Image (cartoon, rainbow, N blue to C red):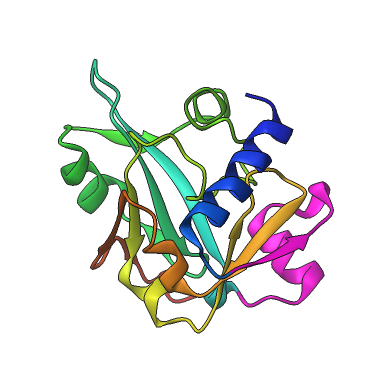
């Protein structure tokens, strides 16, 4: 799937859901969250990362985890247990593209294949609005957290992420 195809799938999915959102264009060189937030003035506390995690087993189960950029995904605890595997890790760039059609830096929970569950950290739900990937590195989606829960495979998970250690 090309980047253009994944962006189209994202917009089609948002339209089908009737979800509230705003498309925010960005320079692809600044698509990674920290750089994006710094360049465009968004808070890491209102920016969410959509991270694909795979279980290390023959079946390679996958989930898209949505966590605030100011937190750390609990890959080896909550995520691993939910995947039902002994080990789990972030999907690498190649597997992310193969399984989602999206490049890292543009992954979004919208427009994913139906068999990929979307797990949303409960902290995300406390935001008035959150900005997530847009399906490609040249745009983001700004939406209320309720738009994320409209996704059929979405589930809000308590403590999917941990607060970062003090600096």
Residue at the spot x=30%, y=23% of the render? Answer: 60
Q: Of residues 125 and 160, which is closer to you in this image? A: 125
Q: Position of residue 44 (x, y in %)?
A: 59, 72
Give residue 164's quadrant in the image.
bottom left
Q: Position of residue 51 (x, y in %)?
A: 46, 47
Q: Position of residue 155 (x, y in %)?
A: 27, 58
* Residue 166 is a magenta residue: no
Side (left or right) of 142 relative to 145: right
Residue 84 vertical position relative to residue 128 in the rendered view, above or below:
above
Residue 11 vertical position relative to residue 70 in the rendered view, above or below:
above
Residue 130 vertical position relative to residue 140 in the rendered view, above or below:
below
Residue at the spot x=47%, y=50% of the render? Answer: 109
Q: Position of residue 144 (x, y in %)?
A: 51, 75
Q: Which residues are magenta?
A: 21-43
Residue 64 vertical position relative to residue 127 in the rendered view, above or below:
above
* Residue 38 is a magenta residue: yes
Residue at the spot x=75%, y=70% of the render? Answer: 38
């Amino acid at each position: 799937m090309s980047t253009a195809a994944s962006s189209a799938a994202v917009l089609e999915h948002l339209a089908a859901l009737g979800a509230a959102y705003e498309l925010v264009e960005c320079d692809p060189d600044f698509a990674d969250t920290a750089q994006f937030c710094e360049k465009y003035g968004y808070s890491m506390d209102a920016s969410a990362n959509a991270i694909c995690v795979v279980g290390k087993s023959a079946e390679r189960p996958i989930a898209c985890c949505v966590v605030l950029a100011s937190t750390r995904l609990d890959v080896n605890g909550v995520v691993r247990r939910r995947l039902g595997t002994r080990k789990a890790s972030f999907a690498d760039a190649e597997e992310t593209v193969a399984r989602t059609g999206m490049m890292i830096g543009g992954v979004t929970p919208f427009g994913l294949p139906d068999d990929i569950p979307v797990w949303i950290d409960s902290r995300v739900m406390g935001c008035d609005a959150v900005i997530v990937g847009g399906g490609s590195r040249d745009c983001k989606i700004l939406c209320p957290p309720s738009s994320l829960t409209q996704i059929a495979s979405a589930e809000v998970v308590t403590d999917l992420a941990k607060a970062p250690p003090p600096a």
